[in-house]
Amino acid sequence: MWDIGLGMKPELTGQGFGQAFLKWGIDFALQHYSPSQLRLSVAAFNQRAIRQYSKVGFREVGSFQNKDVLFFVMTMEV
């Protein structure tokens, strides 16, 4: 399992780049590390990111609280 972290500049969000950006990150991880599973954490309030992650196959498997922010842990089999 590999943890991945992705972040898009706020000024680029909402312009239709999400899927391509996410797929690039996944492809990079697959080509360089060959993981069997990917894992990420996403703030629960970031519904746009959660929708993008879900579209490519990530599923929520847990959650944790960091100070006042709830995070979802999501994984994807590759």
Image (cartoon, rainbow, N blue to C red):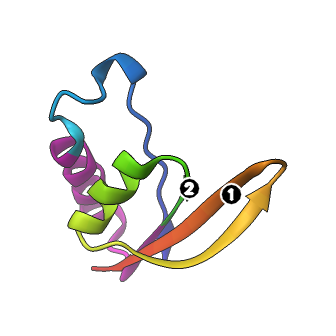
The answer to which quarter of the image holds residue 21 is top left
- Kindly state the secondary structure of the residue where label 1 is placed: strand
Extreme-top residue of the structure? 11
Q: Residue at x 41, y 22 (%)?
A: 10
Is residue 30 toward the left or the right of residue 60 in the image?
A: left
Q: Is residue 2 above or below residue 52?
A: below
Does the residue at mark 1 contact the one at mark 2 (Cβ under 8 Å)?
A: yes
The image quarter containing residue 62 is bottom right
Q: Is residue 15 above or below residue 68?
A: above
| Three-letter residue code for mark 1 | Leu
- Residue 21 drawn in magenta: yes
Q: Which mark is residue 44?
A: 2
Magenta segment boundaries in residue numbering: 19-39
Is 29 magenta? The answer is yes
Q: Is residue 53 left or right of residue 3?
A: left
Residue 4: image location, x then y, percent:
47, 57
Q: Quadrant of the C terminus?
A: bottom left
Task: Please tell me which residue is depicted at 30% across the width and 67% down the height of the picture.
Answer: 54
Give the secondary structure at mark 2. Answer: loop
What residue is pinned by disc 1? 70
Q: Is residue 1 above or below residue 73?
A: below
Give the image location of residue 15, x and y in percent.
18, 27
How far across and how far down the image is residue 60, in percent?
Answer: 47, 76
Which numbered circle lies on residue 15? none
Residue 1 falls left or right of residue 15 = right
Q: Tag 2: residue type?
A: Ala
| Main secondary structure type of the part rendered in magenta | helix
Q: Earlier in the sequence, mark 1 or mark 2?
A: 2
Q: Residues within 10 Å of mark 1 (few under 14, many from 20)?
A: some
Residue drawn 22% across the image and 66% down it: 56
Q: Residues within 10 Å of mark 2 (few under 14, many from 20)?
A: some
Q: CA distance from mark 1 to mark 2?
A: 6 Å
